[in-house]
Image (spheres, rainbow, N blue to C red):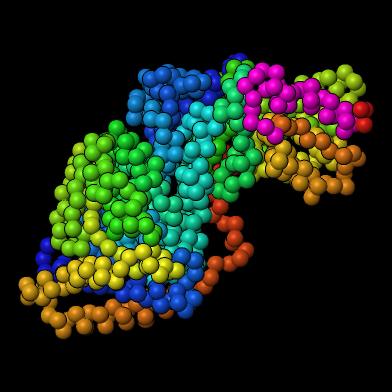
Amino acid sequence: MAEIAYWEAIRRAHDEEMANDKLVIAMGEDIGVAGGTYKATFGLYDKYGPERIIDTPISENSYTGIGIGASMAGMRPIIEIMSINFALLALDTLINAAAKIHYMSGGQISCPIVMRTPGGTAHQLAAQHSARLARMFMSTSGLRVVTPRGPLDAYGMLKSAVRSNDPVIIIEHEQMYNLKEDIPDEEFFRPLEGAEVVREGSDITLIGYNYSVHLCLQAAKRLEADGISAEVLDLRALKPLDRESIRKSVEKTHRVLVAEEDEAPVGVGAEIMAVITEDCFYALDAQPVRIHAADVPVPYNAKLEKAAIPSADDVYHGALKVMGKI
Amino acid sequence: MNDADKKRLLREMIFYRRFEDRTFEAYMERKIGGFLHLYTGQEAVATGVLEMARTGQGADNDYVITGYRDHVHAIKTGAAPREVMAELYGKETGSSKGRGGSMHIFDASQNFMGGYALVGQPFPLAAGLAMGCKHKGTDQIAICFLGDGANNQGTFHETMNMAKVWNLPVLFVCENNQYAIGTHINRSTAVLDQYKRVCAYDMEASQHDGMDIDIVMEASKKAIDFVRSGKGPYFIEFMTYRYRGHSMSDAKGYRTKEEEAEWQKRDPIKIYTERLIEAGIIKAADIKTMEKEIDDEIENDIIKFAEESPEPKVEDLTKYVLDDNPDPRWVGPLHK
């Protein structure tokens, strides 16, 4: 075991998968000579060269399309999009092509691409660098969407994503690249499906994904001091969604809160609430609560930004509301 | 190219014309749904270019990709005509198992990588296929057929740039029929000669008559040799004309009967038929026999197959959305 940062975990997964299979390539803006905006490919340009660590021009839609075309010819491209906001430029090739080609070719052609991209707010990046958008990819047929909460999943899910035959979107978070965790020294894989209970509890279930898992964990600690036992469920994969784990946890605790950094209308939380209503309505002892971002473009001003985005404090108070304590 | 090859090429072009005409009839009979974009008038381009490419050899084929006017490109690359027709009928035996339809013909076994309905989307996909060829060190190339209208998409400029920067083995074939759906090129496009546009990316390019298959083949051979020899991408433009509307609900109010008649004087099948008759390779009477044989094949084999094939099962609705047999080591779930 060794404690490594999120970015180092991603870098290690790139390195191992590229060493394992010559068909694995990485492409994106500044990932090569410059070493990667978040260092996810740091040093790999020197090791694998410009044909496999490909610095692209700032042409998100077409370099994603080139990655998709390469995958149709048997390659395994890992496509980095520097910020999820820029992924909007690549939606045509990603959603109209990658997500649909396997289906509309009657299963003949796979597009095994991985798209890695950070979504989320971080230190006053303002509206055009702070989008979340998980909910948009979650609603697209033909994609897998995963949200690693820490180095263990960041490493293990990237490795699995490279080997999966489906197009996989990995949503990272700008605030998590320096987050550290012990991970095994030997090679391992973490599956692309299945939610995970990351803290056992009996009074309330706090559901999160990506960065919001950490808000849930912080809130759970405070709730414990109040004598409330909170279970924290990390969804891990938004598509396909693990409905069974949601049901199991809610049937155990009978109370539930969903925390997301996306805005609420048609958000991830809305879908989770629908699952709870459909699958475990009668297990509920209290009205569920959603914690989410305000329905505004993310403001620049630090005070406004903080007000727009949910915090651990918001999750804590939301949980107290579910528990009938406020 | 010997006389037998020339006869075969003529037969192929007549076959494509009559195949498309028959799909038109089937559409009118409501046997075919959705949109239907016919290739009538442009036959010499796909036939001539792909005659010079590596096709019909399965996995060793060059990669071919195009837009939604894709039936002929698929067949010339190696797809079975009866499977293409069955696809138009939405049948399980169709080339995309009835999931794609007219605009999304695929035949992976022949490296025909699809028809796409988003104008300009195949540009980057083609460059990616070429990147795959280059990376794997095969001598295959990627060939991308698109119309003049596609060149006004951002993907055109982005892809031309990257194809050149990365020296990818890709041939871009511009079928310039002068109409982007119903808008004439001189109302939508600042530079009318499309091949000139890629000089912005320092790419090799040329423009040719697309109605004469001999010219198409000669020009294509040079372009394909250039690309296959590792010299980088090439953009080849063919001047051509689509006789029918953009799709089926097109009254062609944007152009004159005179213009249509002018182009039809230089019909690709007419030009080539006259040339072969003049050279004594074929007789006028042989053409009639050939047409009869083709119609019989279309009716008794191709249409019959499409008509009699089963539809996909409703219980298979969600098949092919994702990998249907994923490896649990990578995909999971986390807890069994």
Where residue B96 appears, as percent x and y from the top left, is 46, 61
Q: Quadrant of the N terminus of chain B?
A: bottom left
Left or right placement of residue A46 versus residue B139 in this view:
right
Indicate whether residue A308 is drawn in magenta: yes
Indicate whether residue A203 is drawn in magenta: no
Q: Residue at x 51, y 33 (%)?
A: A86
Where residue A148 appears, as percent x and y from the top left, is 62, 30
Where residue B161 appears, as percent x and y from the top left, is 32, 36
Left or right placement of residue B69 versus residue B170 in this view:
right
Residue sitting at the far top: A3
Q: Quadrant of the C terminus of chain B?
A: top right
Magenta residues, as a range? Answer: A295-323
Left or right placement of residue A111 versus residue B226 in this view:
right
Left or right placement of residue B293 versus residue B222 in this view:
right
To which quarter of the image does residue B266 belong? bottom left
Q: Is residue B190 visible?
A: yes
Pick the front one: A65 or B183: B183
Compared with A81, B289 (above or below) is below
Pick the front one: B204 or A157: B204
Compared with B304, B55 (above or below) is above
